[in-house]
Every structure is written in structure tokens, then in C-alpha cells.
Amino acid sequence: MGSDKTVAATVVGERPNAVFEVVLDTRQTVRAHLVGEAERNFVRLVPGDRVEVELMPHDPTRGR
């Protein structure tokens, strides 16, 4: 998905079904989920972790 925008963010909370509340460096809050290798290897995220988030082009409040 070449048109997705990748931005840096900080995890601030966890929601059910492996969805995380993250705050982008621009102070925008979005919901994001794990994908790929992170999900397969049971990577644990806790509040304060720095992550990269791909924002969906059709809905910038959702990411992965």
C-alpha cells in the first residue's frame, strides 16, 4: 500500500482486540492495530513505547 503515510507515535493506551490508542508527534490521537511480524511474534506494547504508524488514506484516524 504505497500511498499510506508513516508517522512516529507514542502508545498511550490499549483497547480490546489488540487495538492501541496512540498519539502522533502532531498531537493527534488515533487508534492503531498490530500487523505482520509484530502480531505473529506476540510483541507486547505498553504505554510510553515509541512506534511507527501507517495512517490509512481513506480514514486518517485509523492506523496500523
Image (tube, grey):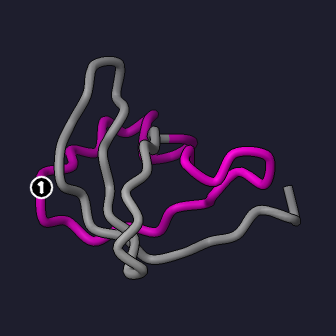
Label 1 element class: loop
Please provide percent x and percent y for residue 14. 21, 36
**Residue at the far right in the pictured view:** 2
What residue is shown at x 43% (from left), y 36% (from top)?
A: 39
Residue tagged by mark 1? 47
Is 63 above or below relative to 16?
A: below
Q: Residue at x 41, y 65 (%)?
A: 28
How many other residues sit within 10 Å of disc 1, few (<14), some (14-19) or many (≥20)? few
Which residue is located at x 79 percent, y 46 percent? 58
Quarter location, residue 62: top right
- Is residue 15 toward the left or the right of residue 26 in the image? left
Q: Which residues are magenta?
A: 35-64
What residue sits 39% from the left and 70% below the top? 24
- Looking at numbered disc 1 in the image, what kind of residue is underneath it? Pro
Residue 40 percent coordinates (x, y): 45, 34
Q: Is residue 60 above or below residue 42?
A: below
Reply above or below: 47 against 37.
Answer: below
Q: How many marks?
A: 1
Specify the quadrant of the image occupied by residue 1.
bottom right
The foreground one among 31 and 18 is 31
Extreme residue toward the top, this view: 17
Q: Is residue 19 left or right of residue 4?
A: left
Picture coordinates of residue 11, whole percent (x, y): 24, 58
